[in-house]
Structures are given as C-alpha cells and as structure tokens.
Amino acid sequence: VTSETAARTRRSHRSEGGDDGGDTSARAWWRPAARWESGLVLVLICVIVFGASESSTFLGTSTVFYLGINIGYIAIMALPLTLIVMTGEIDLSVASMLGLSGAVAGDLWHHGAPIGLAIVAALAVGALGGALNGILVAKFGLPSIAVTIGTLTLFRGLAEILLGSLTVPAAGDRQLPTSLTDIGVAPIPGTQLSYTMLIFLVLAVGCGVLLHATPLGRAMHAIGLQPEAARFSGIRVDRVKFWLYVSSGVVCAFSGILLTLQNSSVSYSAGTGLELNVVAIVLFGGVSIFGGRGTIVGVVLSVAVFGALQMALTQINVQPEIQNIITGALLLISVVVPNGGEAIRRLRVRFKRSSAAGAPRSTTNRTPGSDPG
Amino acid sequence: MSKVRAVHRMAGIAVAAVIASGSIVGCGSSAGSTGAPAGAPTATGVRTGLTVYFIPKDTQNPYEVLADQGGQKALTELGGKVVVSSGTQDTAAAQIPSIQAAIQAHANAIAIAGNDPSALCPSLNQAARAGIKIVTFDSDINCGTSPNHLFINQADTKQIGTSEVDVLAKQINSSGQIAILSAAASATNQNAWIGYMKQQLAKYPNMKLVTTVYGNDDPATSLSVLQGLLSAYPDLKGIISPTTVGISTAAQYFDTHKDVAAKIALTGLGLPSQMKSYVLDGTVKSFELWNPTDLGYLAGYAAASLASGSAGLQAGSTFKAGNLGSYKVLAAAGTTGPSVVLGPPTVFNASNVNQFNF
C-alpha cells in the first residue's frame, strides 16, 4: 500500500504543476502555457488551417452542422466517461449501451408504443445497465476494464436479440415523429449548430462545474489519485463510482435516442465500435488513463479536434485507412507525451540500479513505487 | 501492491493500444475540388464533366472495389469523374460523412451501396434537396419516395434467392439440415434474398433451414460463427452463404478441414477469383454471381444519365449503358422503388470458373 500511495502522491504533485525537485519560481512562468489544453488549441488551429487550405468547402457553413451531426452524439458519451476515468476506472460499454437503448426504444415503437414511453424505457434500461456496471465495479471491486468489456458484449447481444435483422421503423410501422427526427437534418434555427452539439455543450458546462467547482468533483480527483486516502478522508468512494456508472448508462442511452432520431431509424448495430472513439476523445482531451488528472475543457477541445479532423480528411480525399492511422498516432501521442517523463525516469532508475548491482552500496535515490515489478 | 499498480497500468496501456489500433474517424474520403460545371450533352444525351460519388459499403471489400472500378470506367467513357468515398467499416455512420462531402462538393450524382436501409435516408434526402441524383447499387435503401432514387439491381431478387436453394438442393439430394451464413443482420440485400430462400424451401419438404448466422462481412466473425454453426448442428448437410466474404471464408475453412467438406455442401454468392481454387479442387461444387464490375458500370451510366436528365425515374424510361447495351427502368414494386436489373446470375463451376477474371 505504501509504495502505491507514494507513487500516486508523486503523480499528484506533478499534476498540480509542481516540479519533481520542488517548485522553482524560475520555471513557473511558462507552466500554464505548457498545459495539455494549450497544445490542443494549437492542434485545433493547425487542423482548421490545414482543412481550409486543402479543401475549398471546409470553411463552408455546412461543415459546422455536419461536424455536429457526425460527432455530437459520440461527444455526449465522452462526458460521463471523463468523470469515470478521473476516478481511475473505465467504461467500455458506452457504445453498446447506446445500441441497446436504441434497440429498446425501436422495439417498443415497432410494437406500437408512444414515443414518450419508448424514450423513458430506453433511459430506464440505461440506468439499469449502468447500475450493473456500477455494482460489479464499485461493490464487488472487479476491474472495470474486464467488467465493461463483458457488458459491451452483453448489451450488444441483447440489442441484437431485441431487433434481430429488423430496422425500425420497419415496413408498415409508423414513421418516427418528424418534429423529433428533424434534429438529423436541420440545425438550430439561426445557427449552424446541430441539436446534439448544443446538448453536448450544455452537458459539458454542467460536467465542468461538477468536476472543477464542487466538493464532489474534488472527491473524484481524490479517488483517482489516492483511493485509500480518499476513503480514509471520508469520501464514499464506492458510492461515487456507482452513481458515475449509472449516469454514464443514462447519458449513453440518451445518446442512443438522439442517434435514432437523427437517423430516423434504428437497427441493433447502431454505434458499433464507437467506444473506441469515445475513449479516444477522453484520452486525447488530456484525461489521464490512471485517474486524477484532466479537465472538461480539454475534452471539449478534443471533440473539436476530432470533429474538424474528420471533416477535413473526408473532404480532401484521404483514404479511411490513412485517417485511422492519423488518429491512432494522435492517440498514442496523447498517452505517451503526458506519461513520457515518468517512463524515462523509470528507465533511468532501472539503469542505475543494474549498473550499481556490483557495487556494495547503491547511491541511487530510489523512489518508492517506481519499482516496475 | 506495486503489482496491482502494474496491472492497473497494463490495463491502461492495453486500452490505449486497442484504441490506437481501432478506427476513430470512421469516415471516408472525397475529392477536394467542388464539382466541375457540367458541360454540354454528348451524342448519348449525357453531359460531360459530371462528378459522381461512389459510396461503397466500405473501401476494402473486394466486391465493392470491383463495382467502383466499373463506375470509374463508365464515367471515364462519359468524360466525367468518379470519387470513391466510404469508411473502413460497414456502418451507416461511416457512409454519412461521404454523403455530406458529396453535397459540399456539389456532386452531380451519388451511387451508394447502403449499409443500412433507413439510417442513410435523412442524409440522402439532404443530398437530393441539393439537386444530387441518387442511385443505389448492391444494397438498396428503403426511404420510400424521399429521396426518390433508382436501384441498380444486380439480378432479380427473387431469382437469386430461389436459384441458390435450387443449386444446393441439387447437391444434397433435396434433403437434410441446412443453414445460412449471411453478412450483417441488417443488410437489405441479403435479407431480401433470404426471404425468397425461405419461400423456395417450401418446395423441398425434406430440407430444413435450422438457422441463419451473421458474419458481418468480416472474415474473422464469419469464421467464428461458422465454427459455432458446425458444432451446434453436427448433422448439417448444406450451407448457403449469400455474400462473397462469407462463402470465401467458409471455403477456406472447408479446404483445411476435408472431413467437414466431405459432409457439408457449400454454395452461395462468390467471386470466381476467390473461389477458383476451391472449385477446382472440389471443395465447392458450384456457386453464383454476376459481374460486379458490370454492376458498377451500369450504376455509373445510370447516375450520369439521371444527372443529365436523359433518363428519368418513371417506368419505361430508357438509357444507354455503354457496352452493356440499353436498359429500361422498371416500375416500383412492393418496397422496391424504380429499378433496373443487370441480368440473370451466372452459375460458376469447375467447367467455367477459369473464364472469369473478377
């Protein structure tokens, strides 16, 4: 326990902007400019300049709307996931929950239910699915990556059982209400924002306040950095995690409804594989996969970068395979760069240790917890 | 405890690696330039300088690639150009950005193989409102009349479904358990054929369809559902796989498991180039297909003719399709809107498979 705690303490120091050897005022002035978010702003500007110079249609008005249509419903799922990753956990079942929610709503609609009931039922299924993840992770202490890979398959399987080869509305079904499906074809009047993008921005403000300006948000940071310390300081770690999973389930279910309306239809495979996009947005937004570090602003910027990059690459005839490689590289950068410093130090410690192995006494200042064991 | 941390870290790295290898921007590609102003009509009534967006199910499926090439050939003959744009996965979400790109580039027509019968309708509607003509090939969309579009049918849907059952029946003496290995459960074309297969099976009382499994047009998925099928139904006598990915995966498996091949007859829709060796060594007796390059070629001519106004969607409207000759638009029937049919499917076996190079 001591070594783990010590390691987390070190990381928490760095994440506050402190230098390993203590804060030196000479270095402090450029620290704010070197934040991950500043890098994202720079990347975003580069993408926009690149898109505008390579494609004559990139700066057209419809780009903003299409961007919202393509990434809005994905971005919404990234918000609760950000909070979950902050606490050091992960939820890979997000896209399957989106699919299951759409399937539930679609199945009810197919069987004649009113749209309101279909939506409420889908949200309830989202809450149930999230609670299942929450119980397994928070109450039973199972690793969230394993649990949510399991529910990823489970939720998608249930969706497939519900709808099978059916696409709702099927032949003979009522069409979904046009007043709602219009979110897929029309921006908010007077703007180029899609409705999904507006919902994302509103939810982002809410999550930002929650994470950065409330005791609960500080508790999430604490859980991610030092779960034991958080527990001893009176934070109900299990309860926070449980409700985060429930809210993730509900938000993903909501996203599934939005996608159904946007597409005017739903099949069981809606959103297959999108969990990768969602996790990518969160990590590229600068949220540490190890928990405790990250901002909602970073995630919003990350959404803008991914959205703009997709629009630009699609418009300038870049093969989808190459697009995947570009995005994969961006992701690796987002994981390697923030953790690179620590990796280098670990290597250095290991090197010194092995070179000092023959000597009677090592002069290496061993850091507890940096043991790669 | 540091072990726990290490495991935690490994998990994190694993997630990152999985993500990095997966697709993030599930979308396609397109031309940067805006559509060139279309020129004067040629002798066939088709204008030059047309831009047609070909949006296949994905950019890697060999069948779709051949169709795209056919489209390219058609537009080259007509003095226009084709932009091929789609994603790497067979999803509607991967095709929507390509439709948007076509709208933004002021394309003259879109020729699309739908990954979903309905989810593409809102985007295609926007395209139609922007004055873009819509042609579907391979897999139709089901949007009613908005947008109204022309379906380039590879072969009569009923004929494909019934003939595959007949081909299999001949191989297994019209009796025993059979199964279907299809593409995605939501694929419009496969589902339509399977519907007619079931009708045709009523004529063979001793043949029993035990299940339909879905390989999502992905070799790995197709292989695992095939293995599941074989262990769940040890008495299986025949498999119909109405998709080129499914039948080639199954043929490859049969080729390395001769005991299975001896027991179970495999047929369906396959590419001669992929199936040649299996047919010649007897693993597969016969299968069907049409020429996918011709399909794309016909779609290209149809799209250009619609965009030029030299053909319409009304039944009886005719247009010339280069070396394929003249085609007539058929009236809407059932859930299918206006369509043209490429021709009857070809049955390939050891005697003729060498003559085809697609």
Image (cartoon, helix red, strand yellow):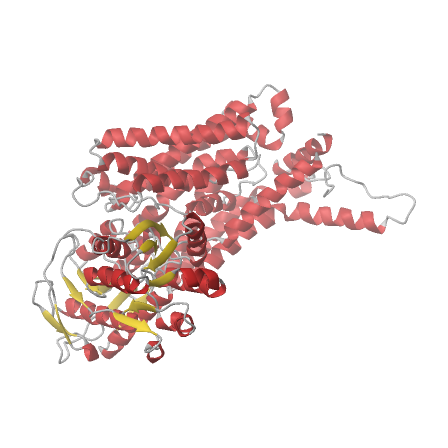
Q: Position of residue A288 (x, y in %)?
A: 56, 40
- Left or right: A288 with respect to B104? right
Residue that appears at 54% across and 38% down: A146
**Is A15 rendered above or below residue A305?**
above
Nearer to the camera, B210 or A280: B210
Q: Quadrant of residue A271?
A: top left
Could you tell me if residue A213 is visible in this image?
A: no
Could you tell me if residue A50 is visible in this image?
A: yes
**Is B111 rendered above or below residue A212?**
below
Q: In this view, which residue lies farthest toward the top? A: A234
Q: In this view, which residue lies farthest toward the right? A: A360
- Left or right: A306 with respect to B341? right
Residue that appears at 30% across and 45% down: A267
Q: Position of residue A129 (x, y in %)?
A: 42, 31
Q: Quadrant of residue B176?
A: bottom left
Q: Tell me the quarter of the image containing the N terminus of chain A.
A: top right
Residue that appears at 61% across and 22% down: A231
Q: Tell me the quarter of the image containing the C terminus of chain A.
A: top right
Number of numbered discs on residues: 0
Q: Position of residue B133 (x, y in %)?
A: 18, 62
Q: Quadrant of residue A175?
A: top left
Q: Position of residue A16 (x, y in %)?
A: 61, 35
- Left or right: B113 with respect to A99? left
Nearer to the camera, B95 or B7: B7
Residue that appears at 18% across and 57% down: B128
